[in-house]
Image (cartoon, helix red, strand yellow):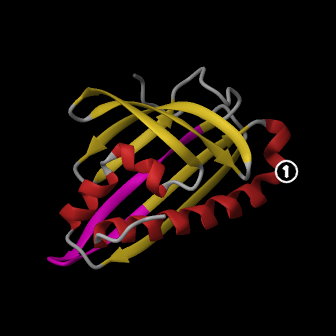
Amino acid sequence: MQLGSNHRRRGYARALRSRPLPCSADRAIAAVQDIKSIERTEVKADSVEVFPESPVAGTYAVTGHFARVPWRSRFAYRLHSTGFHSEKVRGEMPRSWDISGGFVVAALGERACLVVHYEDYGLPRYLAPLRGLIRLYLQRSMEAELRALAEIVAGEPVP
């Protein structure tokens, strides 16, 4: 497993969203570190299979849809004290994309926290003109993902 950015792509679509949650930071951190739950929160993921390599790192395989286009890939993840970070494993599909993202949780008190979600897509040159539309799609999907996370920490079912 290798984590480390590969910034040779010219066009990046970066998105950042945050949401305050009415729960402890520990509860939100536990929710975002449950890598299998990505299939419940990530709009672009239909199924996730997790392959832990240690208590804090591993890989996961994802199949899903990006703007209705079927896709699959494998990501390396690393849990950290405030959430997790993941990056697409080099050589995995889609080969011409660099993809990374994760969550950071900050306590706002004993019963409140702020969850920050970020995604970074290194696009192949032929998609660079669509960077703005891709960023908009990411921002909207991330809002839905944060709503699903809020439902998980509240103990409500996520459809």
Q: Is residue 107 left or right of residue 84?
A: left
Q: What kind of secondary structure does the magenta stretch mostly adopt? A: strand
Looking at the image, residue 11 lies above or below residue 25: above
Q: Which residues are magenta?
A: 99-116
Location of residue 93 (image quadrant): top right
- State yes or no: residue 111 in magenta: yes
**Could you tell me which residue is drawn at 69 percent across and 61 percent down?**
137
Q: Is residue 39 left or right of residue 44?
A: left
Instruction: Work out whether residue 95 or residue 68 is closer to the camera in this orientation and state it.
Output: 68
Residue 100 x, y percent position in the rendering? 52, 42
The total number of labels drawn is 1
Q: Is residue 6 visible?
A: no
Q: Is residue 38 left or right of residue 107?
A: right
**Could you tell me which residue is drawn at 20 percent across and 71 percent down?**
24
Residue type at the position of mark 1:
Pro
Location of residue 6 (image quadrant): top right
Q: Using a 10 Å C-alpha cutoff, classify the residue at mark 1 as few (fewer than 14 neighbours), some (14 to 19) or many (20 or more).
A: few
Residue 142 x, y percent position in the rendering? 54, 62
Q: Is residue 28 visible?
A: yes
Looking at the image, residue 81 lies above or below residue 95: below
Residue 104 x, y percent position in the rendering? 35, 58
Disc 1: which residue: 129
- State yes or no: residue 145 in magenta: no
Instruction: Work out whether residue 105 or residue 154 is closer to the camera in this orientation and state it.
Output: 154
Looking at the image, residue 64 lies above or below residue 5: below
Element under disc 1: helix
Q: Please, which residue is most extreme toward the left here?
A: 110
Location of residue 76 (image quadrant): top left
Residue 49 x, y percent position in the rendering? 43, 33
**Could you tell me which residue is drawn at 63 percent across and 67 percent down?**
140
> Which image quarter holds the N terminus?
top left
**Could you tell me which residue is drawn at 77 percent across and 60 percent down?**
133
